[in-house]
Amino acid sequence: MSTLFIADLHLDDSRPQITSLFEHYLASDEVRRADALYILGDLVEAWIGDDDDAELPQRIARATRAVRDAGVPLYFMVGNRDFLLGQAFAERAGFTLLDDGTVHDLYGAPTLLMHGDALCTDDVAYQTVRRNVRTPEWKAQVLAMPLDARRAFAAKAREDSRAHTGSTQETIMDVNAGAVAEAMRKAGVSHLIHGHTHRPAVHQFELDGHAAERIVLGDWYEQGSVLRVGPEGRELRVL
């Protein structure tokens, strides 16, 4: 009995070995016997729309649909790289879409689930961009572009992101402790699971006089990272 969490796979044609690792993991006994699998954002390096006719989205949909067809509930929350993913692809892939900031009960422990980028409030420039690109008007404008134009746009966005990351202090790009506390307080929980920062760890701390826990999922750039949650506890491990 266990529930599995992954995030920040950043699947891309430039790293085919990670896509293969993802497919093999989804076909594993651990996944097929799980109570549920959650993907908390940034499944791909860039998502240009549910109508993308490239091979990678098709491979992803086949692998994830097989998990759902095996009877394992599969939940997906968009991140900052795949926020254009919508209901059309979710249906093909067998996803149940979750809003960022959803609370699910995990074996008696109400747990806040987030991608994590909304918690990085010290990165003011990023938060400004995040607000602008999440509007329905901006998304509709981009999705109306031809696929080739969207691919070029996504490539430019990745370059800009790398430039921003390279010129910004790491501490600024990490979560803000106050933002974490406020999000957990608002949700009424003592447990939080998120990704985004690529700093896998289990943080124990005190929130309003009570014990609290924040688990950060690892990325899949060089290896896999999985959080296994069960009645007996939580295990964050590398594949």
Image (spheres, grey):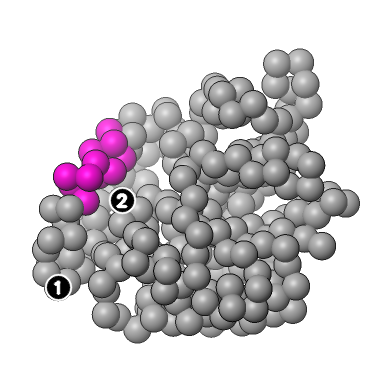
Residue placed under numbered mark 1 in the picture:
148
Residue 38 in picture, x, y percent from top left = 59, 58
Q: Main secondary structure of the magenta part?
A: helix
Q: Residue at the right extreme?
A: 232
Residue 134: within the magenta?
Answer: yes
**Placement of the N terminus among the 4 image quadrants:** bottom right
Residue placed under numbered mark 2 in the picture:
161
Tell me, for residue 80, which label it has, or none.
none
Q: Is residue 83 left or right of residue 232?
A: left
Residue 108 in picture, x, y percent from top left = 79, 42
Establish if 74 lies above or below 41: below
- Which residue appears at 70% of the width and 21% of the height? 207
Q: What amino acid type is highlighted by mark number 1? A: Asp
Q: What amino acid type is highlighted by mark number 2? A: Ser
Establish if 239 lies above or below 202: below
Magenta span: 128-139
What is the C-alpha distance between the residues marked 1 and 2?
A: 20 Å
Please state the total of marks drawn on the protein image: 2
- Which residue appears at 73% of the width and 67% of the height? 34
- Which residue appears at 74% of the width and 23% of the height? 206
Establish if 200 lies above or below 37: above
